[in-house]
Image (cartoon, helix red, strand yellow):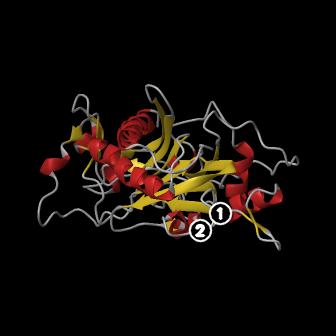
């Protein structure tokens, strides 16, 4: 585990002087990080300059979110209302970084034009990393702005960066036995149309396993920190372990499929299966696992054929599972 004792917190990059955005990815998004390696925290932003249809699914008993209601089917007058999602460390304090994202987009005329102001719609989810590094180092508006200036369409860093900087997994015996989590990105291309890309910050109470082999990738360290203990043997009634508070896995599912808001929310719910395949246990009362969906396709939104929607949900599940594994392996 990192320590910031006796050291100053690092700061993000200075705001860009140009108002121009970099070229978005093939899926129409830009992804950027702010990383505070001294404080062991950070944030990651996914920007949608042309707008996107949004969806969200929140699981577990301890969520930390902002603007999730606007992602739900009945909300909003414009289906392409969403302009970005922020994933952040710092727990509830880190949600302040969203203010910097909103300012960055508004300065560039990206948002809902009301006649009085340009209002970007940005969802956000936070994870708890205050037990790692410096508990007073929390992403703020400047950090969110810096993540936007870093945003790009390709060659995005993974591992101990952005929202995954202070992420940990395997806390059934307390923080002294946990391992590093991290931020992972994975893309799954559908056979004949569309693609799904997932950005996820893995900060789970449970262990992480590779579903293809059953091997434990990260989890609870044993005595001497030489091996990973099976979590099944540790989850017993009356366990002496301290309360597991330092959790929550958060992410964004991006697709160029043209979805309705209802389908985007269905996709967000289905994508949680990828967390269930790789994290044991998942969606606990000590986790606030949250997945957003951004549908960037520009086609008509009259509803996908059922088999296409099932294929998209399956691809999202696979991409989430792959992103979880990449996050902890690259940390």
Q: Residue at x 28, y 51 (%)?
A: 206
Residue 52 point in image, percent of width and height: 61, 52
Q: CA distance from mark 2 to mark 1?
A: 10 Å
Q: Is residue 169 left or right of residue 18?
A: left
Q: Earlier in the sequence, mark 2 or mark 1?
A: 2
Q: Would you name the residue on which mark 1 appears?
A: 121
Residue 239 point in image, percent of width and height: 16, 63
Q: Is residue 42 left or right of residue 22?
A: left
The reply to whether discs 2 and 1 touch (Cβ–Cβ < 8 Å) is yes
Look at the image and tell me whether residue 117 can be seen. yes
Quadrant of the rendered image containing residue 317: top left
- Label 2 packing within 10 angstroms: few (<14), some (14-19), many (20+): some
Q: Residue at x 71, y 52 (%)?
A: 11
Q: Residue at x 26, y 41 (%)?
A: 224
Look at the image and tell me whether residue 137 can be seen. no
Q: Is residue 162 left or right of residue 323?
A: right
Depth check, front residue: 86 or 190: 190
Q: Secondary structure at mark 1?
A: loop
Q: Would you name the residue on which mark 2 appears?
A: 76
Viewer-side label of 2, 1: 2
Q: Is residue 185 left or right of residue 178?
A: right
- Residue 27 is labelled as none
């Amino acid at each position: 585990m990192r320590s910031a004792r006796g050291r100053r917190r690092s700061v993000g990059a200075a705001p860009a002087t140009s108002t121009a955005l970099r070229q978005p990815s093939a899926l129409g998004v830009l992804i950027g990080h702010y990383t505070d390696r001294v404080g062991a925290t950070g944030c990651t932003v996914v920007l949608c300059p042309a707008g996107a249809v949004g969806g969200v699914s929140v699981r577990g008993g301890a969520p930390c979110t902002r603007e999730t209601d606007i992602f739900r089917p009945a909300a909003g007058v414009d289906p392409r209302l969403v302009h970005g999602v922020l994933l952040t460390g710092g727990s509830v304090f880190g949600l302040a970084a969203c203010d910097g994202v909103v300012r960055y987009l508004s300065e560039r005329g990206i948002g809902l034009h009301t006649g009085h102001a340009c209002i970007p719609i940005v969802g956000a989810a936070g994870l708890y990393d205050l037990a790692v590094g410096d508990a007073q180092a929390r992403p703020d508006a400047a950090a969110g702005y810096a993540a936007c200036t870093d945003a790009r369409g390709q060659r995005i860093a993974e591992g101990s960066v952005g929202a995954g900087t202070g992420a940990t997994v395997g806390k059934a015996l307390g923080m002294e036995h946990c391992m590093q989590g991290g931020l992972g990105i994975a893309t799954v291309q559908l056979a004949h149309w569309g693609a799904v890309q997932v950005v996820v910050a893995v900060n789970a109470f449970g262990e992480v396993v590779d579903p293809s082999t059953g091997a434990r990738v990260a989890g609870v360290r044993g005595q001497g920190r030489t091996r990973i203990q099976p979590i099944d043997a540790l989850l017993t009634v009356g366990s002496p372990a301290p309360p597991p508070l330092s959790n929550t896995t958060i992410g964004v599912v991006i697709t160029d499929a043209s979805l309705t808001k209802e389908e985007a929310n269905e996709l967000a719910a289905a994508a949680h299966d990828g967390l269930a395949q790789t994290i044991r246990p998942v969606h606990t009362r000590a986790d606030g696992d949250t997945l957003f969906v951004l549908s960037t396709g520009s086609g008509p939104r009259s509803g996908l054929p059922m088999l296409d929607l099932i294929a998209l949900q399956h691809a999202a599940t696979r991409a989430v599972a792959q992103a979880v594994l990449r996050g902890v392996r690259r940390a």
